[in-house]
Image (cartoon, rainbow, N blue to C red):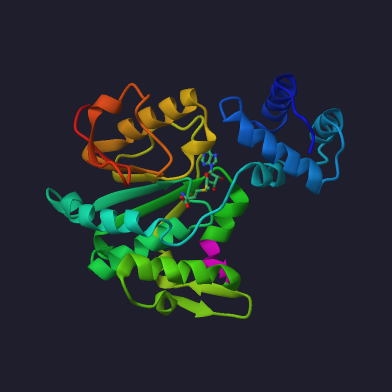
Amino acid sequence: MQDISINDTKRICEVVKDKYGYDFTNYAMSSFKRRINRVMEIKKISTIDNLLAMIKNNQIAKDEFLHEITVNVTELFRDPSFWRALKQVIPNLFLNQQKIRIWHAGCSSGEEAYSMLIVLEEMGLLDKVEIIASDIDKCILEKAKSGRIQIRKMDINEKNYIRYNNNGDIRKYFQYEKEYAVFDLELLKRVSFREINLVNAVPFTKCDLILCRNVMIYFNQQLQKDVIRLFHESLFMYGYLAIGSKESIIWSDVAGKFLVVNQEEKIYKKYKD
Ligand SMILES: C[S@@+](CC[C@H](N)C(=O)[O-])C[C@H]1O[C@@H](n2cnc3c(N)ncnc32)[C@H](O)[C@@H]1O
């Protein structure tokens, strides 16, 4: 593994920003370095100078680089206790309105949005919800849109669903092919997938619920602050925000404008503009 110095990361960020237009300056540097090492391993690059030269000379495509730099690990019903808590909250979203909008920011290959579709379908609420799912990574969004999950990943998904629901069989939402389980395309067409980079995103619509789970963990405090402010602005009054179990809103300057709904499961409610 290559020892990457602070100076190296600065040079990489500058070249990447210049060449690809993505700014990784405010990412958490420990995981960013690990991912750079991964790119170097895959591409068999031995020095940082060679890596920079390859980026400058278009020898690593932008989408490919982005796909390797970002961490796409996800599961259906990831953290089942979170989904149980969220299910309790969902009826509150309909107290003053008939229709609601949900945004999955950093949706990866879609499993989080698929889980939401299943929850809403089982609650009989699907027709009353608009779902937007976004990610920075074009390749992973294509995968999300396809509904395809490798069969070998279904074991954990099936277990999570049972832990969420106490019983049931998630397989009814899938068609099984040779290598893939394909998520119910009728349900899937309810999701609008979009490429959105949270580093420079501006509020594009108002939402009743935003999920951004296991994304900010890769950002430094400054970027986390900016993104939480973006979510605050993107939520209707009394809208909800859900983040990952290892993430926090405490250092955000809008933290005081959220009420804690469930501390353990990191669910918050906007109560001040
Ligand atoms: C670990 S996955 C989390 C997926 C899902 N939310 C979950 O909890 O299972 C992190 C996702 O964040 C995305 N991501 C990273 N940086 C981003 C950015 N600046 N804007 C939008 N998405 C980003 C990655 O592409 C990746 O798909």
Seen as rendered, the residue at the extreme left is: 96
Q: Is residue 263 shown left or right of residue 139?
A: left
Quarter of the image holding residue 259?
top left
Q: Quadrant of residue 12?
A: top right
Q: Is residue 196 left or right of residue 269?
A: right
Residue 115: horizontal and vertical position, in percent?
Answer: 39, 62
In the rendered image, the residue lying farthest to the top is 7
Please report the residue visible at 49 percent of the width from the left and 59 percent of the height from the top.
Answer: 75
Vertical placement of residue 271 versus 181, above or below: above
Quarter of the figure with the C terminus: top left
x and y, in percent, of residue 196 in the image? 50, 41
Q: Is residue 197 visible?
A: no
Residue sitting nearer the eye, 41 or 173: 41
Residue shown at the point (70%, 21%) measured from the top left: 6
Which one is nearer the viewer's eye here, 125 or 122?
122
Is 165 situated above or below 7? below
Which residues are drawn in magenta?
A: 145-150
Residue 38 in view, yes or no: yes
Q: Is residue 123 magenta?
A: no
104 relative position to 23: left or right: left
Question: 30 or 253: which is nearer to us?
Answer: 30
Name the spot of residue 219 as percent of width and height, x first: 52, 32
Q: Residue at x 74, y 22 (%)?
A: 11
Quarter of the figure with the N terminus: top right
Q: Is residue 146 magenta?
A: yes
Dividing the picture into quadrants, the one containing residue 146 is bottom right
Q: Residue at x 19, y 32 (%)?
A: 271
Q: Position of residue 8 (x, y in %)?
A: 75, 23
